[in-house]
Amino acid sequence: MDLEATVPGSSTMTDGVRGDLFAALVDDLGLLYGGDYNPEQWTPDVWREDARLMAAAGVNLVTVGVFSWARYEPRPGVRDFAWLDEVLDLLHAAGVAVDLATPTASPPPWLGHRHPDTLPVDADGVRLVPGSRNQFSPASRVYREHALAITRDLVARYAGHPAVRMWHVGNEFGQVCHGEESTRAFRDWLRRRYGTVDGLNTAWATTFWSQHYSSFEEVLTPRRMPYHVNPTQALDFRRYASDQLRELYREQRDAIREVDAERPVTTNFMGFFPLVDYWSWADDLDVVADDAYPDPTDPHAPADTALTQDLMRSLGAGRPWVLMEQAAGAVSWRPHNVPKSPERSRLESLQAVARGADGVCFFQWRASRAGAERFHSAMLPHAGPDTRVHEGVRRLGADLRRIGSVAGGRVHARVAMLFDWESWWAAEEQARPTERLRVLDQLRAWYRPLWEAGVAVDVVRPGADLTAYDVVLVPQSYVLTEVAGRGLEAAARRGASVVVGPFSGVADENAHVRTGRFPVLLTGVLGLSGEEWVPLPDDGVPLALGDALSLDGAGGTLDGGGVGPGPDGAGAPGGAPRASVLGELVRGEGAEILVTYASGHLAGAPAVARRAAGEGAGWYVGTVLPAPLLGRVLYDVLAEAGVTGVLPDLAGHPGLEAVRRGGALFVLNHSGHAARVPLTSPFVDLLTGARLTTALHVAAGDAAVLAPAD
């Protein structure tokens, strides 16, 4: 292992993106550290204590004003900003920068009371009421006028304030409305998309069930219906809802930029959130930001969190991003809220930095005394600063200062994993062969073996340029456009290994099933074709492995032991590995068959196959494999492509994560056991300053950030 060798396409710790607005902010402040701050819940004496404690903890950025609209505008047209003047002055004097939010995620109760049409309507036709948050219809013109008015006044007053260094529009966009104003907006969206009602009828296949429309005025949102919704109507409504929210974001962002073009503008995403297509939003943000709340009781949380972080980095085309929210301990919205320790909080924060984050923030700074989130953890607990949690907060602040040189660095990946919101939406509509095959389950299952091996992954939108990748994974892409299909075939023919999972390439962009033997666009590159999707029995189906599939280092037993039923696959002790959930009846047409079904409806049919294609190969995995067998297949793909992890023999240390960002190697131990990692050249651990020559020892729950020693 030689970390001094520069990976092609990567950056050193001091390189990276420095020309944009966010990079300039990080250049000035260092890695960003802080959280949401809600001073409207507290008195001025508490503000002064907060500013002092923030400075002592190394906090250099807080988000202010996310839910302050009712305080800014207690009555229509009235403005009360004097309290915020004092807060910003205090923070600036303490050296704490502000990410100032537009307060539009939670309108004051008076708005819904005076204008009930601003309130959202759910799919059952029920109009929701104030008293919580998010009580607005994104299509409401009255709401948007009021939101723009408070945004413009806020920006006009504070664009020149030295504390304000970034702008934050709204909060966690995801509101959906089925009211009359939203219905009219949906019809307008459809007119723009299809031009004529005949175009809509064709796209929606309204010859089915006598659904033909003679006018756009007849079209409704997919509200409660007697039976299944038209799947293309449902898909288009999801597209519309995402676009409507993006338009709302753009209105406020543009109002900010009219006055202040010097500070970055963002909003907070929510990982693999199902209601917004973040691919379509990413270019509208100056920096991608994410809220992440992994469950500390989930054994797969470290790997699944890493996948989400890779998504955030990929949405920004590899540029640094911000972990905008996470919990310092327990959340308050699960049925049973197990806290994470300060050590785990530190590890998750360093994991985000390892995977490209230049900012680590929490919800929230000070724990609320009242309200729905009164039991949500915070950087400063109810018990005050003399607590384990706050001690961990101060430690993390010091750690981030020590590793500040990694800011701007890139993560270089040779593996791409395809994911698309529109395909996800369409794949999980009603009336499909099985509801047990879930897109995110597939993504996470395919990602975990790569995470365990220390192999970096970019999440890529279908149809994107794949020339930088030696391996392209398609765990489940139900909707596949002709452009995306050609891109996959071209990637294989130029030398990449392309791996296609079950229920992929099934439908076109209108969610219409492609006719012919499937996957219609990929049969040539895969060397096989299918005719039937086959949901499998609850106990799965045994598999027969061919001699060509390597079994060495499979990461688990393949003869039944350790491959039990559950989310990782189905199996029976002492028996063959078993396929679960869904299989496909396909026949080989030039592919080398590696695994077949041993019995049942699919007996003898291929389950895993490979075909040479040009300079590369097309791999087919047509079912849900048990985790060890899936890992073995993917490791064989990596070996074929010459892709290796950043640390040798990482699989020998379960729970040990290794990521290279620029010139730094992050080693994170998520396991309950200490790990020893051999070194072949000297390094310095940026967290401790220790010089390491022969080996790195990482305690359970600890981390190291290694830079080549001078």
Image (tube, rainbow, N blue to C red):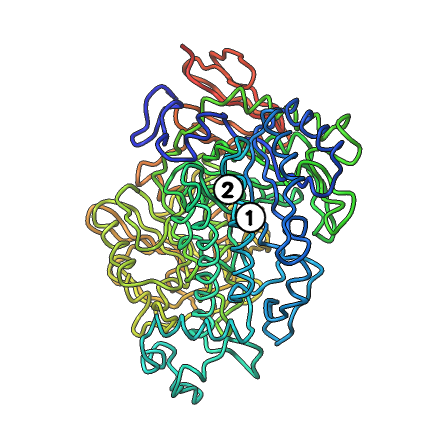
Most foreground residue, 405 or 674: 405
How far across and how far down the image is residue 672, in percent? 64, 31
Residue beneath disc 2:
167
Most foreground residue, 383 or 576: 383
- In the image, what residue occupies the spot 76% across and 46% down? 374
How far across and how far down the image is residue 485, in percent? 28, 59
Residue beneath disc 1:
102
Lateral position of residue 519 relative to residue 454, left or right: left
Instruction: Tell me the quadrant of the picture where the N terminus can be found.
Output: top left
Q: Residues within 10 Å of mark 1 (few under 14, many from 20)?
A: many
Figure check: 590 above or below 361? below
To which quarter of the image does residue 338 belong? top right
Looking at the image, do the residues carrying marks 1 and 2 touch, with CB atoms under 8 Å apart?
yes
Q: Residues within 10 Å of mark 2 (few under 14, many from 20)?
A: many
| Mark 1, secondary structure of its residue | loop
Figure check: 304 above or below 489? above
Amino acid type assigned to the residue bearing label 1 in the image: Thr
How far across and how far down the image is residue 52, in percent? 68, 24
- CA distance for labels 1 and 2: 8 Å
Seen from this angle, which residue lies furthest right?
Answer: 383
How far across and how far down the image is residue 81, in percent? 63, 43
| Mark 2, secondary structure of its residue | strand
Figure check: 678 above or below 173? above
Amino acid type assigned to the residue bearing label 2 in the image: Trp
Is residue 12 in sight in this rendering?
Answer: yes
Is residue 68 in sight in this rendering?
Answer: no
To which quarter of the image does residue 486 belong? bottom left
